[in-house]
Amino acid sequence: MNDHGIASVGEEAGEVRRFWEGLGLPGLIDVHTHFMPERVLHKVWEYFDAAGPLVGGAGWPITYRKDEAERTAVLRAFGVRAFTAMLYPHKPGMARWLNGWAADFARRTPDCLHTATLYPEPDVAAYVREAVEAGARVFKAHVQVGGYDPADELLQEAWGVLAEAGIPVVIHCGSGPAPGKHTGPGPVAQILARHPRLRLIVAHMGMSEYEEFLDLAERFDEVRLDTTMAFTDFTEAFMPYPARALPRLAALGDRILLGSDFPNIPYPYLHQLQALERLELGQEWLRAVCHDNAADLFGRPAS
């Protein structure tokens, strides 16, 4: 039994299902889960195991260190009706290859929203168009790991393609758990000034610049935020969400989306849901965050 009192994945699955059934939902939609080529994912896990600087030097055990088929089965057991394959390059020439893998993963995993990624390089607009034409439904941008400026001129045409197509982009742009050279709200504000209809989903609630990213969401109607790791005991210990911002969070209830970081989380999946529940923002807010907002954005998953 772990520190959260859960003895097995099966027991946890029962608790997760009781959570969403109690809200009258048909299941969950998680916009921030990681699937990528196994050797790439294992490199990511090695980095977490080593408590590298991009994770703030914190101890970070991987709770769901399982193979791809097992991880998919766990999400389905939890009742996650749609999820993503958040993957990202850290150097030029990598994004197109990752997009090819992700397209294949989406073909063989119908409950995964076809995910793609990008990087500032000369052919980025071309392969973003290719991914859109191939059916990509969500993109991932990781400013911290990629070490790039999201307002880079090389990316402007690609952002325009995505804005015109209405395809959401989950973007890790906050300065937590450790800052990057181009993290923070400033570069994102520059993108939105040029592409105000771009559907950005700010990962991790914009950790650690929570209130600054709320500002952007209040200014731009297509900016959303995902809950990934926010409000959990783990994150509250070093980057707590300001209580004074909770009324603003409640008011933006139609633009907050459930994200988890599964499988790369140092606690059970259930804890993210419990952390949202203990905010005491009401069942209507929880229903919207855990399912309805994403269903409206991406379309209702088939029963």
Image: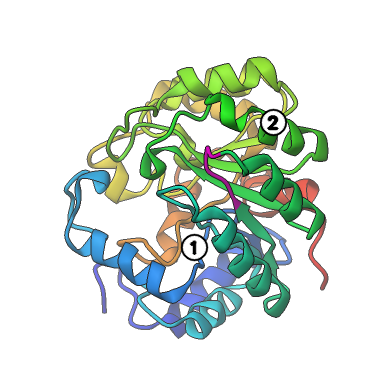
Find the residue positioned furthest to the front.
Answer: 122
Viewed as shown, does residue 8 lie left or right of 32?
A: left
Disc 1 crowd, CA 10 A, few/some/many (<14, 14-19, 20+): some
> Mark 2 or 1 closer to N-term?
1
Q: Name the residue under label 2.
A: 157
195 drawn magenta:
no
Viewed as shown, does residue 9 lie left or right of 248?
A: left
Instruction: Residue 149 in the image: state x and y as whole percent.
Output: 45, 28
Q: Name the residue under label 1.
A: 34
How many labels were placed on the picture? 2
Relative depth, front residue between 81 and 123: 123
Instruction: Residue 291 in the image: state x and y as whole percent.
Output: 68, 54
**Residue 33 at least partly seen:** yes
Quick one: quadrant of the N terminus?
Answer: bottom left
The disc at residue 129 is none
- What span is in magenta? 117-121
